[in-house]
Amino acid sequence: MIEALNVEKTFDRVKAVNGVTLKIQDAEVFGLVGTNGAGKSTLLRMMAGVLIPDHGTVCLDQRPVYDNPEVKRDLFFIADDAYFFPNSTAMDMMQYYSRIYPCFDTERFQKLCGGFELDVTRKVADYSKGMKKQLSILLGICSGTKYLLCDETFDGLDPVVRQGVKSLFAGEMADRGLTPVIASHNLRELEDICDHVGLLHKGGVLLSENIEDMKLELQKVQCVFASEQDQHKAEDQMDIMVHETRGRLHTYTVRGKRSDIEVIFRGVDTVFFEILALSLEEIFISETEVVGYDVRKFILS
């Protein structure tokens, strides 16, 4: 488990990370969401032991990460703009990381590079941005570490490669309990892969929730009531978070189980009624509005 306890980091009097406390459980995909400048990259670098917190602690399996080589062998950090040695090839980078990570699988790395059509003898400097990102991911996958920290992992990847990478993550999680931590500014990018999502804003954690739990406890209802009396009767029984109207069509985001909402609407007359699945973006908008934030102002969709 990765634990950040009241972590702070300041650069030139700008507080990039402000009192962040997070727990990232093993063998789940944790999505770290926020706009540029929210503190995602700085927090990931502290988790990776690249930066030391000004205040607070970051531990991996109850061991401090910073300045601890033994702990760092259990994690691989993929930066948004990954560094490769000048004039190096993918084979050169493989040989370098195989000396750092005892469990690095060189045979699988070469096989995966072939599958992703990466020429391991070509200089990395001649790769496109997307190819460099793919190379970083494959190096991380083949390092055999328990934790993989990814900054804007899918940025620059085409949809086919993106799905391929997600499949790799899923396979590694099933086979050896890999824990990926993925930072992104795009909620939709993470919706189909993450188990848990943390939302960063202005250096602090605004929300950290299990996605399945959120989806089970929030419902989106669209309906047209037969009368105002039916409308008031239904609304009196619901825990309404968001209510929008377009003509006679009412759209509610309500807290509660689907079965409970169905019981409420069986007791009123409607011309039209349906319960829809909420997207991750809609869930976050609803949850953050309740605590006084308009998440739409700073989440890029």
Image (cartoon, rainbow, N blue to C red):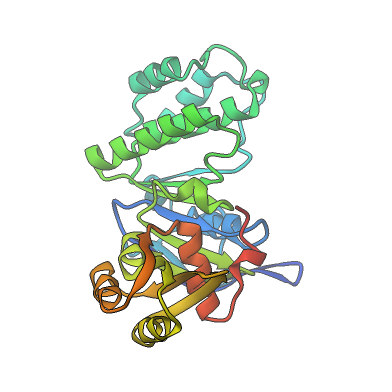
* Point 26% across, 79% down: residue: 267
Give the left or right position of residue 120, taking residue 229 as reference. right
**In the image, residue 134 lies at what x, y percent?**
51, 29
Quadrant including the N terminus: bottom left
Q: Nearer the viewer, residue 57 or 172?
A: 172
Q: Nearer the viewer, residue 195 or 134?
A: 195
**In the image, residue 263 lies at what x, y percent?**
24, 75
**In the image, residue 214 lies at what x, y percent?**
36, 66
Q: Nearer the viewer, residue 65 or 292?
A: 292
* Point 63% across, 58% down: residue: 35
Is residue 95 depicted above or below 263 in this figure?
above
The answer to whether residue 139 is visible is: no
* Point 40% across, 46% down: residue: 192
All told, the count of numbered labels is 0
**In the image, residue 233 lies at what x, y percent?**
36, 86
Give the left or right position of residue 228, taking residue 175 as reference. right
Is residue 192 depicted above or below 163 in this figure?
below
Give the left or right position of residue 289, taking residue 216 as reference. right
The answer to whether residue 25 is visible is: yes
Is residue 163 depicted above or below 204 in this figure?
above
Q: Residue 226 falls in which quadrant of the image? A: bottom left
* Point 35% across, 63% down: residue: 215
Which residue lies most toward the right here? 12
